[in-house]
Image: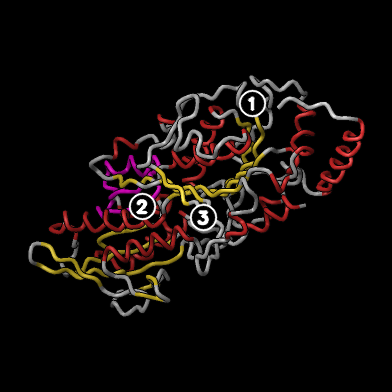
Amino acid sequence: MKRKLFSMTMAVIMGLSLAACGSGGDQKPADEGNTAVEDKTDAPSDEGSSDESTPAESDDSASGEVANKDKPLVWFNRQPSNSSTGELDMAALSFNNNTYYVGFDANQGAELQGTMVKEYIEANIDSIDRNGDGVIGYVLAIGDIGHNDSIARTRGIRKALGTAVEKDGDINSDPVGTNTDGSASAVQDGSIEVGGKTYVVRELASQEMKNSAGATWDAATAGNAIGTWSSSFGDSIDVIASNNDGMGMSMFNAWSKDNNVPTFGYDANSDAVAAIAEGYGGTISQHADVQAYLTLRVLRNALDGVDIDTGIGTADEAGNTLSEDVFVYNEEQRSYYALNVAVTSENYKDFTDSTKIYEPVSKQLDAGAHPSKKVWLNIYNASDNFLSSTYQPLLQNYDDILNLEVDYIGGDGQTESNITNRLGNPGQYDAFAINMVKTDNAASYTALLNQ
C-alpha cells in the first residue's frame, strides 16, 4: 500500500502510537528457541509489488496504521472451543470483523471413516475373523480426548460398528482401557450380519495416545500400545482404527502389516496412502489442499479489503474458485469447513501426493493488485506428521501464489507458551494464522493482540 502523506500533527500522533505498540520489547525475540520447520524471514516483502516504501517503512505501516487487535486472524486446524463440552468459543471466533476458522467437517469425515471400516469388514468377512471366534475385535487409537476432531472420529467408529453408548445426550467418546470381556461401560458390543450369519463387534481396547511429556496424537505411543495389545490379545485383534494416520502408520509398521491386520487412519498422509498397496486398510482425505488454501485466502481477502468469498465461492480475477462439493461455510460459526473423501484400495492412486496444490485454485495473483503482506503462522507441533509433512508444504506453495510472506513457527505440541513467547512483536505483521496446542487457549493469543 502506498504511504499516504500526513500532516506534521498526524506524524506526531503516529509516532506516539508506534511508541505504545513497542511495549513488547522486553519479551523474547521472535526466533528465540524457534523450532519452526522453516522461517521465511529473508524473503523481500516488497518484491514484485507496487509498494514504494522501504522494508523498515513497511513494518512501521503494519504496526501503525492498523492496531494488532484489528488485523485479520484465522484460527485453523484447532477450532476455539471448550475441550470438555465442545462448545465453540464465539468470543475467539468473532475476535474482530476479519476473524475466521478454517478446518474440515469433522462429523462428515467421522461418519465416512466409520462407514469405510464397516464396509471393509462386510466385504472381507470370510477372512477378517482371524481366530474364528465369531467376534470381530478392534482396537482404537484416540488422539486427544479433549479435541473436537478426535472426539468426532471416535464417535464415528463406534456409531458405524454399533459399539456406541450414549452419555450426556451424545455418543460416549471416553477411552475404555481394556475390554476383552465386553463389560466396559463406555462402549457396548455391536453386531454385523453378513450372509445370514451374525458377528459380534467388540472394542477390545482404546486409549489416548499421549506421551510422558504431555504431547497428544503421539505416534510413538501408539506404536508401543499396539505392542502391548498384541501381546495381550493376540489373534483376537481383527481391525485397528486410529484417529489419524500418524498413529495408524506407527501401529501398521510396528505390528499390523506383518500380521495382515487392516489398519484405518485419517488425514491421507502420503505414507499412509502408499501403504494401502501393502495392506493399510484406508484413510480419509480431509482435503488439506483446500484447507491450506482457505487458511491463507481468507487472510488475503481481508488484507485486500475485498469480499471474503473472493477466490473461494466466487472466482477472482485470475480464475481461482472452489466448487460447493469441496467446502462449506457456516456463517454463524464464522467457519470454513473442507469436505472429506474416503481413500481406499479403489482410489488411493489419486491421492499419492498429499502436498499437491488444488488445481482450481492454483493460479498466481497479480502482485500489483495484491502486494506482498507479512503473516505470522504457527504449527502447534513441529513434529506432527500431518501438519508438518502435508499442511505446511501446502501452505508454502499457496503463500507464493497469494503473494504472502509467511513466517512459520513450529511449537513443541505441549505448551502454549512455547509458541506465544515467539509472538513478541505482532506489530511487524499484517495478519495472523493460529494453530493452538489446546482448543481452550485462544485467549493466550488474543491477549497478545489486544496489548
How far apart are the alpha carbons under marks 2 and 1? 40 Å
In the rendered image, which residue does mark 2 sit on?
265
Disc 2: CA contacts within 10 A as few (<14), some (14-19) or many (>=20)? many
Q: Residue at x 51, y 55 (%)?
A: 333
Judged left or right of residue 212, residue 203 is left
Q: Nearer the viewer, residue 256 or 446?
A: 446
In the rendered image, which residue does mark 1 sit on?
371
How far apart are the alpha carbons under marks 2 and 3? 28 Å
Residue 339: percent from left, percent from top: 38, 47
**Three-letter residue code for mark 3:** Gln
Q: Secondary structure at mark 2?
A: loop
**Three-letter residue code for mark 2:** Gly
Q: Quadrant of residue 46?
A: top right
Residue 12 on the magenta segment: no
The nearer-to-camera label among 2 and 1 is 1
Q: Residue at x 57, y 61 (%)?
A: 89
- Residue 445 drawn above or below residue 395: below
Residue 5: percent from left, percent from top: 82, 26
Residue 336: percent from left, percent from top: 48, 47
Q: Could you tell which of marks 2 and 3 lies nearer the N-terminus?
A: 2
Residue 281 on the magenta segment: yes
- Residue 276 drawn above or below residue 133: above
Q: Could you tell which of marks 1 and 3 lies nearer the N-terminus?
A: 3
Q: Nearer the viewer, residue 14 or 30?
A: 14
- Residue 156 drawn above or below residue 95: below
In the rendered image, which residue does mark 3 sit on?
333
- State the count of labels: 3
Judged left or right of residue 114, residue 122 is left
Disc 3: CA contacts within 10 A as few (<14), some (14-19) or many (>=20)? some
Q: Which residues are magenta?
A: 258-284
